[in-house]
Amino acid sequence: MIRALNNRIRVGAAVAAIAGLALSGVPAKAADAPGVTKDTITLGMTSAQSGAASPGYNKVGPAMRAYFDYINEKGGVYGRKIVLKLEDDKYVPTNAVNKVNKLILRDKVFALVGNLGTATHTAALKKTPIIKQQVPDLFVNTGYSGFASPKKYPTTFMYLPSYIMEAKVMSKYIKDKFPGKKIGILYQDDDFGKDGLAGFKAAGLTFVAGGTQKYASLSQATVGLTAQMTELKSSGAEVIIIFGVTSATAVALRTAAALGYGTTWGPQFIMGSVGADPTTLLTLAGATTAEARAATLRSLTGALSLSFLPAATDTEDEYVKKFIEINTAYNKGVVWDNNVLVGMNQAMLVVQALRAAGQNPTRASLIAALKSKGGTFASAGYSKLDSANNVGYTGYWVGRYNSTGVIAPVDGGKPVVYTADSSTSNGDVAVSTFTRPAMPADGVPTNS
Amino acid sequence: MLAVRSSHKPSATKRIILAIAVGALLFVASNLIDEYRIFQGAQVAAYLVGIISIVLLTGYSGQITLGQGAFMAVGAYSASLVVQEFGLPIWASFFVAVIAAALFGAIIGISAGRLSGPYLAGATLAFAVGIPALANAIPILGGEQGLSFDIGYAPGKYADTVSPYKWLFWICALCAIIAIVIAVNLTSSGIGRQWRAVRAHETAAALSGINPARSKVLAFTVSSGFAGLAGVSFSATVGLVAPSSFTLALSFLLLTGSILGGISHISGALGGALIIVIIPTIFESWTEEASLGVATYLPGIIVSALLLLSIALAPEGPSELLHKIRHRHRH
């Protein structure tokens, strides 16, 4: 009798436990979507993990994985652990096609997240089944405005503000602070650089004769920019825009020092956000000699740069603070910098998108959730994330590097964020009124 | 393919029948395997043609090349240009690629005719470095991002039912089969014998009535034509013709594949192509940690190690080694 009662209690307890688990959000069954099982959600990413353009950017993917590990330890997304398959495309379009094909066809990932590079991703969109299989293509890590096209690329969402926006903000700042000065530019000769040029044109910024220089850096290493920097010097440009990847920016700064920057030559450098991580710039320079590092630092001191996230050195920022903690615990041995911040922030957006897609997500529900709720996600970004229109962040602040390579807002205090759109028919820039959502408790999103 | 070595060589007709049978087999296979394997199959087919072009030039004619990527680039760019600028149909662009690369090869062959051994290798190496850089500097070739090359979908009502990967595979496999048939027939013809004679002993070949210079130029021209076909097939797999597709690394990869497969026989090309496509995939799936430097470079290290081993243990390639072992057992 007593044994029978005990059994009943046991059965009752088991039923209660199962009901409790179900109510607490553990999915009852595997969702009907590729890459989603009862216990896991598999995501894919391609980036430059090696090769000429990889310095700095090769830290973004591992940083994302570190944040996912942190979330997995906290229970994952509705009980499912996030698995990130990270593939190296070396910043070469041909490789990107191969790797994205592998991720979609063989690994059957649920979504692509944070694929990095303009030319690489253009090729992938053209020759892989991203569009055909409606694979969510979240937070592409480039500012090429062409990707924000719901008609052409219905499943692609950007992460960075567009290069056109960046060029407009940069133009406004240059016109306001350096009126009448001669302007020069060094840009990457592909859609990345050309998108920037379109923005400068829209904003009515004109360059001095001989002051428009380009470099090619996709397939070859950036072997030298002496010719370009010498041309810029002899053009008499007083403000020089460097619109390139980090490895090219490092070479440009080092070359400038060799050409007499700081002694016989003193233009104002202003750098695009994707090439401006000081830790990477100085590590790249220091990889050769201490003098090279000192030379780069000399050129970097006083240079201006645009950012859409807080400075990685702003340890008072609640997002930066938490991400540093996660980096220390889950990304062991990796030096904290802007690239790690970019990756962690991106991963946090991905987690919120997955949560918003529901307990049994499908590719369609993920895209719909991002479209309708992306603008409300908590993130370190100082401007609105315009996922409703497949656009990434929409604003930048301007900072200046000091003699130790630390960047701070130009006017001191809190950064002033400028916002613009990607239209090439105007150069309009406005001060952003966006209020950033607070960091979720413990850095773990609980949105739905 | 082993038939090339046997004393009872099949006739050209039999070879064509065999090729049709292989084609039919591949067609059936393409309906049974998953899309990623089909995509890899297309890559293998493209590399296969590239390796054949090296085998013909180096294995048969004895001229060392380090710059086959350059000839592939010439073919691929020509194909893309005639489609974009003159509106030629895609199928015609494959012929254009072969002809353009062959013409380019003929010009290079004539001028490089005086070079041999390491000097010729150096000259071809210069092309491998120079051609992508040149392509980058000519605006009509689309700079770093290159030109689009889209073979599109299967025609007519098949567009919806045949996956783009199958379509791609069929085209690349067809090119590879045609290339193999032509190469095998060529090498077992008088021309092939002349090439081998020149490779073995130039003076002796000249004494027996062969014009070594003409023979070498012809080998260069034919090999470049094959490289052009490889270039256009390779571009079809990625939908793009760009300088970054035809780097020095590609030239070396093809050379590696040809040595691993066995540079002195057409039959080795398939093995070589399989090795350079499959090995990286296997090792990547073993490691799956692109964040670790070692995993990123591991496939390259393994292929390089195989190359060193192959040169040390079987300089003529594994297929030749097997042939020798079999031959030894017969005595």
Image: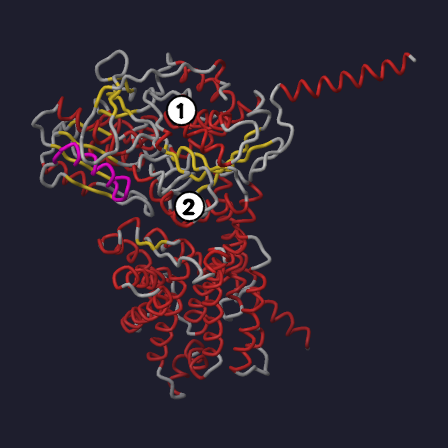
The residue positioned 22% from the left and 17% from the top of the image is: A410
Q: Is residue A373 left or right of residue B100?
A: right
Answer with mark 2 or mark 1, whichever residue precedes in sequence. 2
The residue positioned 38% from the left and 65% from the top of the image is: B65
Instruction: Tell me the magenta residue range.
Output: A188-206
- Residue B21's x, y, as percent? 57, 72
Closest to the observer, A362 or B148: A362
Check the image and report above or below for A153 versus A286.
Answer: below
Pointer 2: residues within 10 angstroms few (<14), some, or many (20+)?
many
Quarter of the image containing the N terminus of chain B? bottom right
Query: Is residue B151 within the magenta segment?
Result: no
- Residue at the far front in the pictured view: B157
How would you classify the magenta stretch by its main secondary structure? helix
The image quadrant that residue A236 belongs to is top left
> How many numbered tags mark residues here?
2
Q: Is residue B308 visible?
A: no
Asked whether the residues under the numbered discs 2 and 1 touch, taking CB atoms below 8 Å apart as contact, a structural biologist would say no
Q: Which residue is mark 1?
A: A341
Q: Which residue is mark 2?
A: A96
- Residue at the far right in the pictured view: A1
Structural distance between the alpha carbons of marks 2 and 1: 24 Å
Chain designation of label 2 = A
Label 2 amino acid?
A: Ala
Check the image and report above or below for B272 versus A235.
Answer: below
Check the image and report above or below for B153 versus A217.
Answer: below
Check the image and report above or below for A287 versus B245.
Answer: above
Closest to the observer, B197 or B98: B98
